[in-house]
Amino acid sequence: MKPKDLILVLDFGGQYNQLIARRVRECNVYSEVVPFNISLEEIKKKNPKGIIFTGGPASVYGAESPKCVDGIFELGIPILGICYGMQLMSYILGGKVSSASTREYGETNVNIDNTSLLFKGFESTNIFLMSHTDYVESLPEGFRRIGYTSSCPNAAIENKDKKLYGIQFHPEVNNSVNGSLVIKNFLYNVCNCSGDWVMSSFVEDSIRSLKEKIGNKKALCALSGGVDSSVAAVLLSKAIGKNLTCIFVDHGLLRKNEGDEVEKVFTSQYDLNFIRVNAKDLFLDKLSGVTDPEAKRKIIGEEFIRVFEQEAKKIGKVDFLVQGTIYPDVIESGLGKSSVIKSHHNVGGLPDTIDFKEIIEPLRNLFKDEVRKTGLELGIPENLVYRQPFPGPGLAIRIIGNITEDKLDILKDADKIFTDEIKNAGLDRSINQYFAVLTNLKSVGVMGDERTYDYTIALRAVETTDFMTGNWSKIPYDVLGKVSNRIVNEVKHVNRVVYDITSKPPATIEWE
Ligand code: XMP
């Protein structure tokens, strides 16, 4: 069931588009990202309380530049244009957009008119992130300036009667001070939203509508131990109890103790049928001697589906297959943007020989942070809900080269030490992903008076919002030192620890 108020975010290709939609939702208003050229009929059907035009790399004068449909400004729906979105609005409504001789980039002091509804609660100046070359030189009729900087004459504009607003800066990024307040002002002061998007009502509504939809029929869910499939499964179990069967294929490539933790949560806390398939030997057998990263990924992806299918066949016909698809997957595939650097294997990928009537994706409208909030609402333990992302192929792609059981054990122990120490240092929420890699490199060391010839463990830690780009994390030396000491002392066959100081790009987050 959808909430009453909707904000449409028209995607003009800017890099922060998902972030804008997330910020809106953080203000308790539901939002959806849609293509920039969405038709008037479609907009009317969706009946939004407001529309936001995102930024984008184009110039309004470019022949190929993305344009919204004619008539959108006459719908009477409030519109906020951000960066390119502001320029487009001005250009279409008769203003003049020009190109500056140099690009303005960075955190900039913006003089603002705080009598505008958009800037209610602000001081007369505020730091916002600017990133543009084009700017609005003269305003369309009916507009007035409500913000400027030393180099940008019109950094914010409004036509209060028509509820049209434009800002040259990016309120959605953290570098903008109180940026969320600009969005909140637009939602509540201009669009009159009621703030009805809260996770508790999402949970209640979802359970109710899943009950109605599924009734007494049966559903099947593949569990990976990850956040998304776990939350989807629990939501379903609250709706249909024992009519849900979860199959947890444990490929043996999970982190230390992880398989047992997943089993414990699902068997002790929730009412559902839980089947754990311990398939480590099978996976290790299939992976034996395989060194090529893509080959490893393919084998694991295929084998996972095969094991899942075999188990599902034992259950017989099911009516629904549950998947943990989340909103960023929907946006990215919907807008055709994904690029394949690695063939990602997402546990829960669609087996095509299972007999079922329909797929259910209860989280397809949620961002990751909302999935986590939903998980907490459902009583899933924090350590599972805040689990960092973990690739479907698991530790297989963190052991460079050939995989053996011994290597797996070494990596699990080293990884546990690293993750424990990151938590002890209170860094686990600020670093978005951190893990150990078993390099295939052996080197000479000395332990006591003995020469050793053992493995090198690499530590990887990145800070990122979207996992498409990221910076290596500046972990304090004393934390790194402690991790290194503990690993070489406590994990047999490791005599050297190195820290990966490459950002993405050019490196990827995982090593394979
Ligand atoms: P890379 O290594 O491409 O990883 O920089 C970006 C993010 O994706 C995760 N990752 C995967 N997730 N199946 C997944 O579900 C996969 O096959 C896979 N490979 C990488 C990686 O952990 C990081 O968060």
Image (spheres, rainbow, N blue to C red):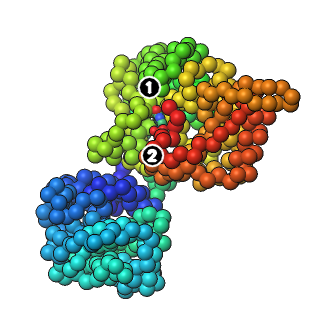
Q: Is residue 311 above or below residue 116?
A: above
Label 2 SS:
loop
Instruction: State the image coordinates of residue 269 (x, y, percent, origin top left).
Output: 62, 37
In which image quadrant can residue 268 be found? top right
Residue 350 relative to residue 154: left or right:
right
444 and 85: which one is in front?
Answer: 444
Residue 448 relative to residue 157: left or right:
right
Instruction: State the image coordinates of residue 440 (x, y, percent, origin top left).
Output: 60, 26
Residue 512 relative to residue 445: left or right:
left
Q: Residue at x 65, y 39 (%)?
A: 498
Q: Is residue 403 above or below residue 160?
A: above
Taking the view exactly as shown, the residue that stands out farthest to the right is 449
Instruction: State the image coordinates of residue 301 (x, y, percent, origin top left).
Output: 45, 24
Q: Residue at x 28, y 58 (%)?
A: 57
Asked if the residues shown at circle 1 and circle 2 are in contact, with their CB atoms under 8 angstroms apart, the answer is no
Q: Is mark 2 within 8 Å of ligand 1?
A: no
Residue 229 relative to residue 72: left or right:
right
Q: Residue at x 68, y 54 (%)?
A: 476
Crowding around mark 1 (Cα neighbors within 10 Å: few <14, some 14 to 19, many 20+) is some
The residue wearing badge 2 is: 505
Q: Amino acid at mark 1?
A: Glu
Q: Is residue 41 above or below residue 266?
A: below
Nearest to the eye among marks 1 and 2: give it.
2
Q: Residue at x 28, y 72 (%)?
A: 101
The residue wearing badge 1 is: 294
Q: Amino acid at mark 2?
A: Pro
Q: CA distance from mark 1 to mark 2?
A: 19 Å
Disc nearer the start of the sequence (1/2):
1
Crowding around mark 2 (Cα neighbors within 10 Å: few <14, some 14 to 19, many 20+) is few
In which image quadrant can residue 318 be found? top left
